[in-house]
Amino acid sequence: MKGLMMHRPLKIADLITFAAENYPSGEIVSVRTEGDIHRTTYLETSKRVARLAHGLRRLGVKEGDRIATLAWNGYRHFELYYGVSGIGAVCHTINPRLSAEQMIYIVNHADDRLLFVDLTFVPIIEKLREQLPQGLRIVVLTDRAHMPETTLDGVLCYEEILDGETDSIDWPDFPEDQAAGLCYTSGTTGHPKGTLYTHRSTVLHAFNMCVTIPKTLCEGTRILPVVPLFHVNAWGLPYGAPLSGAGLIFPGGALDGKSVFDLMDREKVFSAWGVPTVWLGLMNEINQRGRLPEGFGDIVVGGSAAPRSLIEAFETKGINVCHAWGMTEMSPLGTQCNLPPQLQQLPLEERLDRKQSQGRRVFGVDMKIVDDAGNRLPHDGKVSGHLYVRGNTVTSGYFENPEASKEVFDAEGWFCTGDVAAIDADGFLKITDRSKDLIKSGGEWISSLDLENIVMSHPGVAGCAVIAVPDPKWDERPLLIVQARDDAQPRKQELIDLLAVRVAKWQLPDDVVFVEALPLTATGKVSKLTLRKTYAEDME
Ligand code: AMP
């Protein structure tokens, strides 16, 4: 028997309407590319979003059209999230750190109609213009006074699209599985692949965030998304914040430790979200100044494993660390490691053991681990296997890419994350490696993540990576690559000795290489692909 409740499709635009009605003065603060600070509210933003939606329609944007952005974190980018999806079009966020080749591929593959760019990125588009779709129109995210001199033809000014439009709108109805957002993963091999989010998956993800990270996502807190709007929707913050009433502080393009510290201090940011590299930079700054930014209480760290030493540094200064795991293909939140009160009371070392894990799954994301043959493995915290997920916020296939889609689902329809993990009886997930990053030495696995974590605890180490290099006897052996801190000169033997206390002798790296700077991927993670190309070419 069917139930008798109304069915209202879940729609993204309803989030901003909700925020405007419930938290009209909730603040959005942005460091602008024009160089100043801009302040607005959810009420004002909802009005500008309505004007943008009308303006987009005037430009001929229809349901299903892909509208691209190449922009930092700021209020105009946020408005596009809502204005574009609100009228049933698809907001396609592009990562400006991608190579020219990848960017050209993505814009052509997505067949974008409009491309909204920050002032900073106009020169990139000038260079690529010839290789982008003919009909693509470029809009610069600024006002008339700041429009740049450019070689681009027919370029439009963002503020002029809004000018003269009315500031209210009846959002159109469409099914909740209508496409709303598109984000390509940079991928380790082949072309980038697009994850196409729906209104339903996005709204459910916003609920999930608010339920699982409630102390951060609540009315009146101030959150700094250092994680970019071009990377998996800034982990869902543009949706979770308006739903919960939290304010957003957008940092623009300056993401070094000093800039982040100054912004957090000035704007009394409570919670800041980003990848470990950013927090290492901030911790340096905190140590140099001998104090925390005012109002600071919490970080959410994900995108790659948070080193134990990093978690410890923040926790011992009274900052709650929420270690989270997810993927572009998962919207992205899969698990989060805020501890319940009884575990928060644990002695530091035990608390760190817990926090080093990626935490427990959010509702609606099911997880299983399997062996090479696909057999399920127990959730005993000891055995690790290939991690698969399924759920309402997980992709069901890549955008217009059946070949890539075929490779990532098992016979039961679960999505293969490419991560290797253990899950314990309390539901805590521990990522031990990426499948490709594991090292198989003499038939035994060595976890690169475990070794990296230990090396990161050395005070002279700014960053490190362990990769497999081919070995005639053992098949593969671990190689440690280290970026030292500015003023430090850690010695090889010191690092090996540090490891030797914690891991078996056969797991110790055969060699240590020091580099000026570790290569980073477009999303700010250490690029093991690049390192493998340099140090282990034969394996590729
Ligand atoms: P992306 O889709 O670019 O966000 O990359 C997703 C991948 O990043 C995951 O499959 C993991 O390999 C890695 N990752 C994300 N968060 C974590 C984490 N907290 N710990 C370890 N690996 C992570």
Image: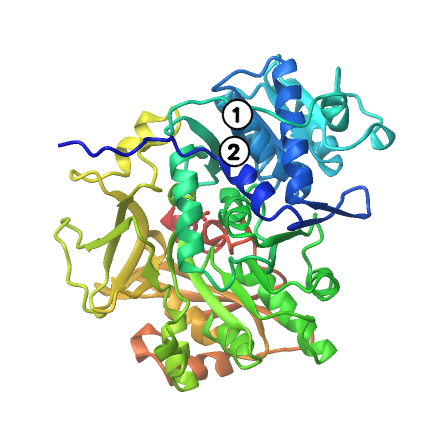
Q: Position of residue 247 (x, y in %)?
A: 62, 53
The three-letter code of the residue at mark 1 reads Trp
Q: Is residue 71 left or right of residue 179?
A: right
Dot 1 alpha-carbon crowd within 10 angstroms: few under 14, some 14 to 19, many 20 or more: some
Q: Residue at x 19, y 64 (%)?
A: 379
Mark 2 residue element: helix
Q: Residue at x 56, y 27 (%)?
A: 84
180 relative to 206, above or below: above
Q: Position of residue 82 (x, y in %)?
A: 56, 33
Query: Can you name the residue that lies furthest to the right here?
Result: 145
Q: Are dots 2 and 1 in contact, CB under 8 Å?
A: yes
Q: Earlier in the sequence, mark 2 or mark 1?
A: 2
236 relative to 395, above or below: below
Q: Residue at x 54, y 65 (%)?
A: 299
Dot 2 alpha-carbon crowd within 10 angstroms: few under 14, some 14 to 19, many 20 or more: many
164 relative to 371, above or below: above
500 relative to 366, above or below: below
**Total labels drawn:** 2
Mark 1 residue element: loop
Q: Residue at x 67, y 55 (%)?
A: 255
Query: Can you name the residue that lies furthest to the front here?
Result: 4
The label on residue 171 is: 1
